[in-house]
Amino acid sequence: MALEIDYTKDDQILQVYPQLPLLSSRDETWPGLHLGYYRQPAHETPEHFAKQYIIGIDLEQPVRSSDEPHQKRGNCGGTSCIYPANYTFQERWAKDTEFIDLYLEPAFLTCVASEVIDLDRVEILYHRTVYDPFLRQVGLLLKSELELALNHGVASSPLTSQLYAESMATTLVMHLLKHYSTAKSPVQNSQEGLSPASLRRVMSYIHEHLAADLSLTEVAGVVPLSPHYFATLFKQSTGETLLQYITRCRIERAKHLLARKSLAIADICQQVGFSDQSYFTRVFRRYSHMTPKAYRSRL
């Protein structure tokens, strides 16, 4: 009889894998999304099904066997696999392997999907082996930002906050609906985006609260719209995700504050919503191609 596994719980992971993940988002406030980064020895799992949707991303080549009828993961590095919740499968790999698993909670996927499709007519399909650079990028970005948070002790940095996780999880669900579901036209987005008045209210709210750890739910409530529908409309209106827009605004505000030589960089960091100065420096350099100190020296 197949085991039922909740991949957010260590004791249940050890029922199918010999080792726990090296990196896990279990202690983060990521709504609807969980990440596990694994290095596992050669192993064959028992047949089991997960409570969550699983998006597996292989990071090495060769990796896992795909022999039928066991319905195992792909055998090419850089490929991904998709397991619907409650789908029975088994895995086997003949050597040490490295992979990322993203786990989506069914309630979260249903909440996002209900706003764009008829749930009675759609389901996410099982895919044993797909080459999808987008899925790989999402997994690596989440892993990278989680490592950054743990290495610097940043519990509430913008890129590991609820806002980041909500945005990434929503984007991931929309991608699955568009490319890996039974819906013929799964994503029915409005082409107009937010109204000009709504967009002005949202932007004004963001600029007034840059020092806070803004969440997607909080910002969407300004309009008000559901978080997932708002995220889609905001991207249509601005060409940026909410996270990208907020981060850019924080960096622009920091540039203005750096012109005031009396303000310490540590104080500026706090005023634009970063709880850790080293993390602020990294993001600032990503957007400006120089450190805050170097930018101030050029003024």
Image (cartoon, helix red, strand yellow):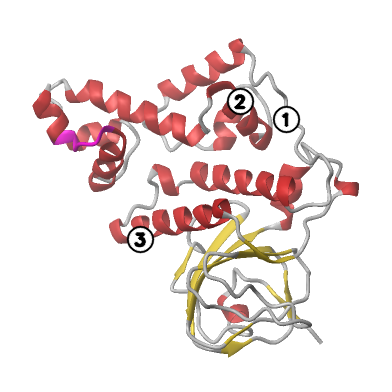
Circle 2/circle 1 CB separation < 8 Å: yes
The disc at residue 189 is 1
What is the secondary structure assignment of the residue under circle 3?
helix
Look at the image and give the residue range highlighted in magenta: 288-293
Tell whether position 292 is magenta: yes
* Residue 171 found in image quarter: top right
Identify the amino acid type marked 1: Asn
* Residue 130 found in image quarter: bottom right
From this viewpoint, is residue 264 visible? no
Q: Residue furthest right?
A: 120
Disc on the earlier residue, 1 or 3: 3
Left/right of residue 229 with respect to residue 125 in the rendered view: left
Tell whether position 269 is magenta: no
**Residue for point 24% across, 42% down:** 281
User: Residue 244, position in %: x, y?
Assistant: 45, 34
Instruction: Look at mark 3 in the image and give the residue it sits on.
Output: 150
Image quadrant for the N terminus? bottom right
Image quadrant for the C terminus? top left
Question: 94 or 5: nearer the eye?
Answer: 94
**Residue for point 86% across, 41% down:** 118
Question: 69 or 100: nearer the eye?
Answer: 69
User: Residue 270, position in %: x, y?
Assistant: 28, 36
Alpha carbon separation for disc pair 1 and 3 = 36 Å
User: Callout 2 environment at 10 Å: few (<14), some (14 to 19), or many (20+)?
Assistant: some
Instruction: Look at mark 2 in the image and give the residue it sits on.
Output: 236
The disc at residue 224 is none
Alpha carbon separation for disc pair 2 and 3 = 33 Å
User: Residue 286, position in %: x, y?
Assistant: 30, 40
From this viewpoint, is residue 55 visible? yes
